[in-house]
Amino acid sequence: MSVNIVAPLPGTVSEILVHVGDVVKTDEELIILEAMKMENPICAPRNGVVKELLVSSGDKVDAYQVLIALE
Amino acid sequence: MTDKPDKKMSRAQKKEMEYEENRQHWLAEEQKVYELWERAYNPGGQAQNDRLAKQGKKPPRQLIRQLIDPGTEFFELSRGAGFGIGYEGVEDVPSAGLVTGIGKIHGNWVMMLANDSRVSAGAYYPISCKKHLRAQEVAERCGLNFVYIADSAGAYLPLQDRIFPGRNQFGHFFYNMTRMSAKGLKQYTLSTGGNTAGGAYIVYLACESIMIEGMSYSFLGGPPMVKSAIGETVSMEDLGGAKVHTQISGGADHFVKSQDEGIEKLRELLAFDPKQTLYIDRRKPAEPKVSSDHLYQVLPKETARGINVREVLAAIADDSYFSEYKRNYNPGRGDNIVCGKIFLKGIPVGVIASNNNGVIFVDSARKAIEWVIRCSTMKIPLLYIQNSPGYMVGTAEEYAGIGKYGSGMVRAVACTEVPRVQWIIGPDHGAANFGMSGRTFDPLFIFATMRARTSVMSGETAGFILTSLERVNRKKRGEEMDEEAAKKFQQMMIDKYNREAHPFYMESRLFNDGTLPLKDCRDALALAFEVALLQPVRESKFGNFKF
C-alpha cells in the first residue's frame, strides 16, 4: 500500500534527502521544509521505498500538499 | 539496482557525519558551562582564597561537601547567577554571592545556603535576594529542612532601594524562615562570620543556631554604630560574639570553636529527623540502552532545526523505553508534541515533549491538554521538554481555535497539582513558553541546556518585526530607511534578542535554575522528581476549559 507524505504546514522545500527507489526506515528524514523560520525535517511514517518525488528543492508548498509517495 | 545500496550508504554516512558534527559542537559549547562554573567556584581568584584562609575559613562549597553524607553529591542550583548582571559599577556578582543547592544529610534531602564572603563580604545585591528566596521557595514547596551557613555583610548599601523595601527582598528571608519553621520544616543556622542588623535574624530566627568563637558575630548595631549612638566603646566579641549569644543573650544555642566543629554540630542536629518517604511507587532503575553521548548526537547544532524528540527520550528514559500516548495521531501536526510515560531512574514520569519543529498546532495542543489531565488523575509528575518556537499562525489555525486550545494548555499547566519540571533543549518562545510550563507558570525546577533560547520571539522573527516597525516610525517622521540601514538595524535587533535569549543570560537572572551539560541532565531530572515527591501529590482541579 502506498502512502502520501504531505507538508504539515505551508513552507519552502529547502532540501530533499532521498532519491526515487531509496529504501527508507520509520522516522528517517526525507525532506527539509523551511517554515515558521524553522527547518522542519519531514520523516518517513513507516518503512518503505520512495516511489515518487513530487516537489523540487526551492518549491513553495501549501499545507497538505503531497511531497513524496512512499510504497 | 546495484547503485541503491551505495545511495543508502551515503545517506547513512551523511547522518553519521551530522551526528559527529553535532557532538563536537555541543562538547565545545559545554566548555563554556565548565568555564562559568570555574568562575563561580573561585570568585576573586587566589587573592580572595588566601584572605579566607587567613581568617581560618573554608570556601562555602567545601563546607557544604563536609556537611553532606560522605560519598554523595551536592546538587548546586544557579551557579551562573549574577554573572553579567550589570548593576551600576558592578558588572558581575559571581553566583549572586551565595551558594544554594540540595544534598543528603543522614539520608534525607536538605536545602542548603551558604554566603560566599569572597564576593563583596557576602553582601546582598538584588539578585542575591532573588537567589536566597528561590532556595527557600523550593524548600518550602518540597518540604525540605533548611541549613543556612551565614556570613554576610547585609544589604549592599548603594542599591538599598532594590534590596530593602519591596516584597521579594531582604526581609522576606525572615518571613519565610518563620513560616517554614511553623510548618515543621527545620531552620538551622551556622554563623561563620558577621551577621549584622536585620541579617542577625538569620541566627536568632533559626530553630537552633550555632556560633563560632572568634569568628561569628551578631548584633543589631556594630561597634561603630554603638559608639556614635550612645558613646559606648565595645569590641565585636564583647558586643555580639559566640559567647555573648550562647551564654548571656540566649539568641544562639550552640557554642563551637571552629567551622569543622560547627559542621559536625549541624549533622548532629539533623540526625534526629525521621527518614523521608517517597510518595510514588519507584521501580528498580535501569540505564538507557543508547550510548552515553546519544543526546550530543541527536540534538542538531542549529537551534532552528527540528528534532526527533523520541531519540532524546531514549537518552534519558530507563531502558530507553517510552510508552507513547496517541502515537499515530495526525503525524506532522499532532506529534509536534509527543506525550507518554517513561521511568526516570525508577520513577514514573509523564512526558510532554516538543517534537519536530515544535510549532504547536490545534491537534498537538489538544493532545497535550488530555495528557496533563491524565497524569493529574494518575498522580504522576510531569516533565515538560521544551523545544517550541510558538503556536502555529494563520487563518486555518486561528479558525480551528489555536488560541482556545493554547489557553487550554495554559489552564492545564497552571492548575495541575502534580510536580512539574521543565527541561529546555531548544527554542522557547512566545506563548509556547507559557503552555510548556515556563518560569511564569511556576514549575518546581527549570533546567536549561546550551541549546536553549528563551525570549518573547526568536531573534530572526524579532529582527523582521522590529525593522518593519522602525521603518513605519521613520516614515512618520518623514525619513526614509534605505536597505543598508534596514539591514543594519535588523542585525542589531537579532543580536540583542539572541544575546538575551541565551541560557547564561537566563541563569544569571534566575529565570532558570541552571544550565546543565547534556550528560548530566538525566541525573538532574531524576533528582528533581525525587525531591518533588517527598510530599503526597494532591488532587487537581481545573477551571473552565473550552473545547
Image: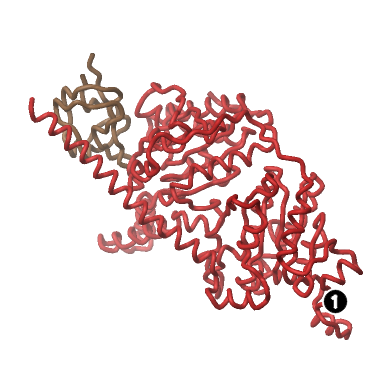
Chain in red, by letter, is B
Residue B256 visible in the picture: yes
**Chain ID at mark 1:** B
| Mark 1 crowdedness (10 Å alpha carbons): few <14, some 14-19, many ≥20 | many
- The residue lying toward the viewer, choosing from B43 and B50, is B50
The picture quadrant where one finds residue B251 is bottom right
Q: Say whether residue B319 is left or right of residue B471.
A: right
- Which image quarter is the N terminus of chain B in? top left
- Position of residue B67 relative to residue B334, above or below, is below
Identity of the residue drawn at 19% across and 23% down: A49
Chain in brown, by letter, is A
Residue B393 visible in the picture: no
Q: Position of residue B20 (x, y in %)?
A: 28, 47
Identity of the residue drawn at 61% across and 39% down: B530
Amino acid type shown at disc 1: Leu
Query: Mark 1 falls on what kind of element?
Result: helix
Q: Position of residue B67 (x, y in %)?
A: 67, 56
Q: Say whether residue B387 is left or right of residue B238.
A: left
Q: Residue furthest top?
A: A1
Identity of the residue drawn at 44% across and 55% down: B502
- The residue lying toward the viewer, choosing from B332 and B104, is B104
The picture quadrant where one finds residue A14 is top left
- The residue lying toward the viewer, choosing from B172 and B196, is B196
Q: Residue furthest right?
A: B248
- Position of residue A45 relative to residue B189, above or below, is above
Q: Residue furthest left?
A: B2
Q: Say whether residue B431 is left or right of residue B211.
A: left
